[in-house]
């Protein structure tokens, strides 16, 4: 988590992804959404805005705040999530003797693990477990250019940025509170273009990975293999999916290659956790989130393939929209990341 400064005001969440932006405010005492909104944006223009000189992101945050808010936002203090694929997170063990020089030890680990110079990164870390001989450290790093671009865009829109973190950490925060996330859990976050995979144990991220296929990939698979329009393919995906129906076998066959890639990467993450992180804490569940989780039968697919209880996460059983008009059922999953940002208590943010 990159902490920028602290203001004891309600925090709103802003999720900046490769395909759009989402915003949300939550009354955490009542677990009530009090304001939200989203804009779908051109991926190429978003990429240019995060890496180049374009003002596209700032202009669309302004547009979102002015024209697309359902309900209200209680402050201008904002926490931002960036795509996990643009970040680096790693959990590792160190001898307890290095704690006095922990910053140097973490920097050395980052130099070995991260393929770009640490001088180009914002690096954050914390001790998440302490044993008799070892400490377990969670490290997160985000390229400075992306943090700076997001911060500048938000500030141009009149927001005060209090911290920035990878989106998978936001997701895990919400699931820990709403889906028995204290259990050793695999999270599969299927976005439009990418899928992030993580293991959370004792409410902490232990290992992350990602793959460049997502919900849009599945839609295009169906369109291409069945010879139908992308729009019709999307309808088949969100209304039929992998569940029993006359077209079940055709949809399964059309999406088989992409689902196999998701499964292979998930197995790698599970194996890494079991072999290097914990050989005594059995993984208890797999939770599917993200816009791609709106495919019926996706939970059962992971259950059958991994022989592990799997389901689509549904934090909305605890977190509700009250009197606000709700997003369509198939659109709710897109708000899980930003909800995870919006539940951060202001007192947990400091200038460490």
Image (tube, rainbow, N blue to C red):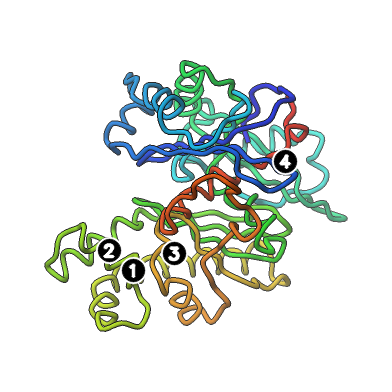
Residue 71 is drawn in which quadrant?
A: top right
Q: Classify the position of the C terminus by image quarter.
A: top right
Nearer the observer, 20 or 98: 20
> What is the x, y in percent for residue 93?
71, 52
| Residue on which the image places disc 4 | 126
Residue bearing the label numbered 1: 239
Q: Residue at x 61, y 71 (%)?
A: 285
Residue 188, placed above or below residue 127: below
**Which numbered disc, 3 or 1, marks the residue that appears first in the sequence?**
1
| Residue identifier under label 3 | 265
Classify residue 155 as left or right of residue 257: right
Name the residue that disc number 2 marks.
235
In the rendered image, residue 51, in percent from the top left (x then y), is placed at 36, 27
| Residue 170, quarter of picture | top right
Q: Residues within 10 Å of mark 4 (few under 14, many from 20)?
A: some
Q: Position of residue 184 (x, y in %)?
A: 67, 66
């Amino acid at each position: 988590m990159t902490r920028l400064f602290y203001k004891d005001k309600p925090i709103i969440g802003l999720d900046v992804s490769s395909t759009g932006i989402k915003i949300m405010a939550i009354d955490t005492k009542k677990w009530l959404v009090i304001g939200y909104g989203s804009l779908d944006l051109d991926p190429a223009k978003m990429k240019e805005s995060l890496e180049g000189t374009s003002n596209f992101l700032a202009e669309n945050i302004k547009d979102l705040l002015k024209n697309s808010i359902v309900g209200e936002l209680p402050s201008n203090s904002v926490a931002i999530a960036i795509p996990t694929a643009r970040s680096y997170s790693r959990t590792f063990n160190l001898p307890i003797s290095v704690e006095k020089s922990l910053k140097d030890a973490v920097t050395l680990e980052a130099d070995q693990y991260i393929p770009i110079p640490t001088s180009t990164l914002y690096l954050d870390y914390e001790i998440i477990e302490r044993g008799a001989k070892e400490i377990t450290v969670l490290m997160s790093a985000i390229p400075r250019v992306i943090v700076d671009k997001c911060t500048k865009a938000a500030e141009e829109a009149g927001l005060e940025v209090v911290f920035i973190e990878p989106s998978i950490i936001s997701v895990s925060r919400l699931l820990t509170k709403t889906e028995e996330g204290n259990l050793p859990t695999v999270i599969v976050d299927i976005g439009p273009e990418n899928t992030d995979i993580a293991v959370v144990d004792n409410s902490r991220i232990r290992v992350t990975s990602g793959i460049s296929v997502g919900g849009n990939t599945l839609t295009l698979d169906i369109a291409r293999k069945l010879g139908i329009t992308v729009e019709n393919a999307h309808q088949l995906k969100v209304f039929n999916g992998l569940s029993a129906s006359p077209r079940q076998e055709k949809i399964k066959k059309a999406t088989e290659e992409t689902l196999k890639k998701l499964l292979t990467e998930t197995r790698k993450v599970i194996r890494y956790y079991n072999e290097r992180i914990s050989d005594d804490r059995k993984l208890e569940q797999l939770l599917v989130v993200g816009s791609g989780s709106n495919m019926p039968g996706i939970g059962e697919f992971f259950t059958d393939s991994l022989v592990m209880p799997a389901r689509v996460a549904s934090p909305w059983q605890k977190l509700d929209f009250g009197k606000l008009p709700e997003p369509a059922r198939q659109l709710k999953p897109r708000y899980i990341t930003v909800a995870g940002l919006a539940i951060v208590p202001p007192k947990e943010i400091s200038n460490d």
